[in-house]
Amino acid sequence: FAFFAQHFTHQFFKSDFKKGPAFTKALGHGVDLSHIYGGNLDRQHKLRLFKDGKLKYQVLGGEVYPPLVKDIQVEMHYPPHIQEEFKFAVGHEAFGLVPGLMMYATIWLREHNRVCDILKQEHPDWDDERLFQTTRLILIGETIKIVIEDYV
């Protein structure tokens, strides 16, 4: 459960790796899930599939995982011994350092794409952007519900 708290709070307290661990970017406010979707529009676009509102993903052993860093070119921090084929790209650049944080990023990626599938089925006329933004709002709601009902 500690990883959930750390994963959740990373959207508020974003370390600025260029200035050092004592500095935060603190650009936004509130629950925006930037740790899932990226802290800026460029990163968000690199993580998006731009089809049916989904985030990019890969299938390994029949299971959905984030795409590889080398395939989408986002900055991620990993320990030096991690091989390229195990460097996944997610919304927060530090999540490669802690397996528990990568686990939650993977769960939310799967949930985002699952909700997109449901919305696409219910609203076949919706375009990619509407599916993406509506799904993001739904996941924000799910996150708040989990924090309030199960964590607090």
Image (cartoon, grey):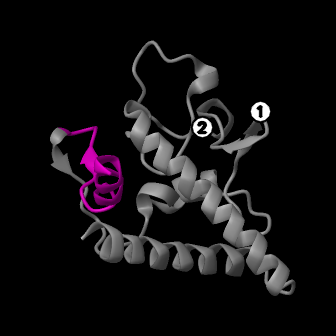
Sequence order check: which comes first, mark 2 or mark 1?
Answer: 1
Q: Secondary structure at mark 2?
A: loop
- Magenta span of residues: 1-20
Question: In the rendered view, does 109 fall on the left or right side of 9?
Answer: right
- Foreground tag (2 vs 1): 1
Q: Return the residue at label 1.
A: 61
Residue 113 locus on image (x, y percent) = 69, 62
- Up the image or down, 89 lies above or below 24; here it is above
The answer to whether mark 2 and mark 1 are in CB contact below 8 A is no
Question: In the rendered view, does 61 fall on the left or right side of 152?
Answer: right
Looking at this view, name the residue that lies furthest to the front: 150
- Up the image or down, 105 lies above or below 120; here it is above
Residue 108 locus on image (x, y percent) = 54, 57
Q: Return the residue at label 2.
A: 73
Give the residue type that dot 1 points to: Gly
Residue 131 location, quadrant? bottom right
Q: Nearer the viewer, residue 26 or 142?
A: 142
Q: Nearer the viewer, residue 79 or 129?
A: 79
Q: Residue at x 77, y 70 (%)?
A: 117
